[in-house]
Amino acid sequence: MLNGVEETLQALGARHDLTLMTKGHPEEQRLKIERSGMGDVFRHAAVVPEKDAAAYRALVAELGLDPGRTWMIGNSPRSDVNPALAAGLNAVYVPHPATWRLEQEEIVTGPGQLLVLERFSQLLDHF
């Protein structure tokens, strides 16, 4: 796990309802969540075939979330930031040098707020 992620998620989970959204085969992704030992910090985990604006809108509707108060945190402009902003959510972009190059694209601002942080642990300064 990346430096500071576990501690940051534990602290955020104590103050906020966290939801994990991941893309892929449901059983494989659920095993990864179990192996991480971090499944308990998330109120909900969703495994979707594609992380696009429709998937974010569907998750918000399913959980009864207020889009204007909902934040997506991720390192992929293509699968995290841009679709969340397009769905009317707020987004935190935490760039990582190992992000797959096909997940890189220009960030397109949407109706929601965009916050760019250098380190995952900086989330505690904002949330």
Image (tube, rainbow, N blue to C red):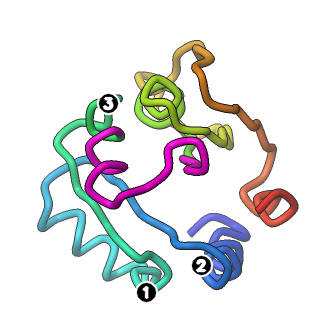
83 vs 64: above or below: above
Q: Give the side of residue 20 with respect to residue 122, left or right.
A: left
Q: Which mark is residue 40?
A: 1
Q: Is 86 placed above or below 27 here?
A: above
The residue at 41%/77% (across/down) is 43
- Amino acid found under the numbered disc labelled 3: Asp
Q: Are marks 1 and 3 in contact (CB under 8 Å)?
A: no
Q: Which residue position is annotated with label 2?
A: 13
Distance (Cα) linking label 3 and label 2: 24 Å
Q: Residue at x 33, y 61 (%)?
A: 63
In the rendered image, residue 67, in percent from the top left (x then y), is placed at 50, 43
Q: Nearer the viewer, residue 64 or 92?
A: 64
Residue 75, quarter of picture: top right
Query: Pointer 3: what residue?
Result: 52
Tell me which numbered mark, 3 or 2, is placed earlier along the sequence: 2
Quadrant in which the C terminus is drawn: bottom right
Query: Relative to 72, is 119 on the left or the right?
Result: right
Residue type at mark 1?
Answer: Asp
